[in-house]
Image: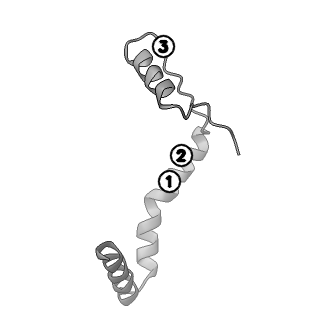
Amino acid sequence: MAKSSRSRDPNVTAFSIVQQATGQAEFNVKSEKNPAAVALGRLGGLKGGKARAAKLSKEQRSEIAKKAAAKRWS
């Protein structure tokens, strides 16, 4: 497991936030994602729900919806 560069000490975190907000420190944001992989994942995600719904019968979709509603309201 990779070690996080953020401190668990709330005082250190607060100091860092103030430094960044006042322009005394740079935001250190790195994007380590592969753009090609992101595009492929998004493509699959865009069509995934529709494709799954098309495969399911009306009764199956209804049963899934009932389970989801019961879980939300429990």
Identify which residue is drawn at 45% across, 9% down. Answer: 24
Q: Which residue is mark 3?
A: 25
How far from the left and from the top, in percent, is residue 45? 48, 58
How far from the left and from the top, in percent, is residue 4? 62, 36
Identify which residue is drawn at 67% across, 38% down. Answer: 3
Q: Earlier in the sequence, mark 2 or mark 3?
A: 3
> Mark 1 belongs to which amino acid?
Leu
> Mark 3 belongs to which amino acid?
Ala
Q: Is residue 41 left or right of residue 63?
A: right
Few, some or many residues within 10 Å of mark 1 (<14, 14–19, 20+) = few
Marks 2,1: beta carbons within 8 A: yes
Identify which residue is drawn at 38% across, 18% down. Answer: 21
> Mark 2 belongs to which amino acid?
Ala
Q: Which residue is mark 2?
A: 39
Q: Quadrant of residue 20?
A: top left
- Relative to 34, say whether 74 is above or below: below
Q: Quadrant of residue 14?
A: top left
Q: CA distance from mark 2 to mark 1?
A: 6 Å
- Relative to 56, say whether 5 is above or below: above
Marks 2,3: beta carbons within 8 A: no
How far from the left and from the top, in percent, is residue 18? 40, 19
Pick the residue in front: 30 or 11: 11
Q: Is residue 33 left or right of residue 66?
A: right
Q: Which mark is residue 43?
A: 1
- Relative to 59, say whether 18 is above or below: above
Q: Residue furthest right?
A: 1
Identify which residue is drawn at 55% across, 35% down. Answer: 8
Q: CA distance from mark 2 to mark 3?
A: 32 Å
Q: What is the secondary structure assignment of the residue under circle 2? A: helix
Q: What is the secondary structure assignment of the residue under circle 3? A: loop
Q: CA distance from mark 1 to mark 3?
A: 37 Å
